[in-house]
Image (cartoon, rainbow, N blue to C red):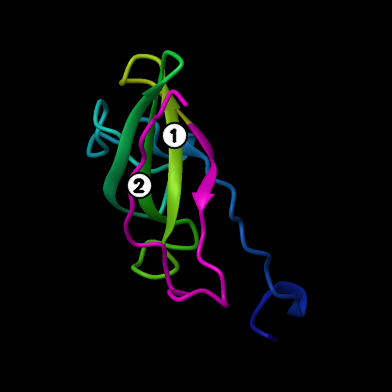
């Protein structure tokens, strides 16, 4: 604790801010990427009411494998994406407390 300025522990910054990658020539420009940290396997692309939804395995806590949730993004043109809140997240008392690893989505008009 004494090594931190003023002896206080810094607070984690968990906000997802895509602007930190503006101008990064190595970051994909047209392929979807998570706003930050670890991403794997886009799942369940679906079109609903004129918008495209994409879900993907994502760890919003860091750039590593663990605590996997389903990220969610929406687009009107499949190029420009808007991040939405996490769709599914692991819970301590579930059968898989370290992650929501797979799944799918379907639209049924009923």
Magenta stretch secondary structure, dominant: loop
Q: Residue furthest front?
A: 110
- The CA distance from mark 2 to mark 1 is 9 Å
Horizontal placement of 14 versus 9: left or right? left
- Tell me whether the residue at label 2 lies in contact with that at label 1, contact meaning CB atoms closer than 8 angstroms: yes
Label 1: state its secondary structure: strand
Crowd class of label 2 (few under 14; some 14 to 19; many from 20; radius 10 Å)? many
Rendered residue at 52%/47% (across/down): 86
Tell whether 22 sits left or right of 32: right
- Rendered-image quadrant of the N terminus: bottom right
Which residue was labeled with disc 1?
Answer: 73
Camera-side residue: 37 or 24?
37
Residue at image coords 43%, 51%: 70
State the residue in front, 108 or 17: 108
The stretch of residues the image draws in magenta is 83-110
Q: Which residue is mark 2?
A: 56
Quadrant hosting residue 68:
bottom left
Which circle marks residue 11 in the picture?
none
Report the number of numbered marks. Answer: 2
Compared with 46, 103 (above or below) is: below
Answer above or below: position of 104 versus 64: above
Q: Outermost residue, bottom direction? A: 2
- Residue 100 position, x and y percent, is 41, 62
The reply to whether the magenta stretch includes residue 70 is no
User: Could you tell me which secondary element the residue under label 2 belongs to?
Assistant: strand
Q: Residues within 10 Å of mark 1 (few under 14, many from 20)?
A: many
Q: Earlier in the sequence, mark 2 or mark 1?
A: 2
> Could you say which is closer to the camera, residue 8 or residue 106?
106
Residue 39 drawn above or below residue 4? above
Q: Would you say residue 86 sits in the magenta stretch?
A: yes
């Amino acid at each position: 604790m004494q090594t931190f300025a003023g002896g206080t522990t810094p607070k984690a910054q968990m906000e997802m801010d895509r602007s930190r990658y503006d101008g990064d020539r190595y970051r994909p420009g047209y392929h979807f990427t998570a706003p930050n940290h670890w991403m794997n396997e886009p799942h369940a692309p679906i079109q609903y009411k004129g918008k495209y939804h994409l879900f993907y395995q994502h760890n919003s806590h860091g750039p590593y494998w663990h605590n996997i949730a389903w990220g969610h993004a929406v687009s009107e043109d499949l190029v420009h994406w808007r991040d939405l809140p996490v769709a599914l997240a692991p819970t301590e008392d579930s059968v898989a407390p370290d992650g929501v690893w797979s799944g799918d989505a379907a639209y049924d008009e009923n």
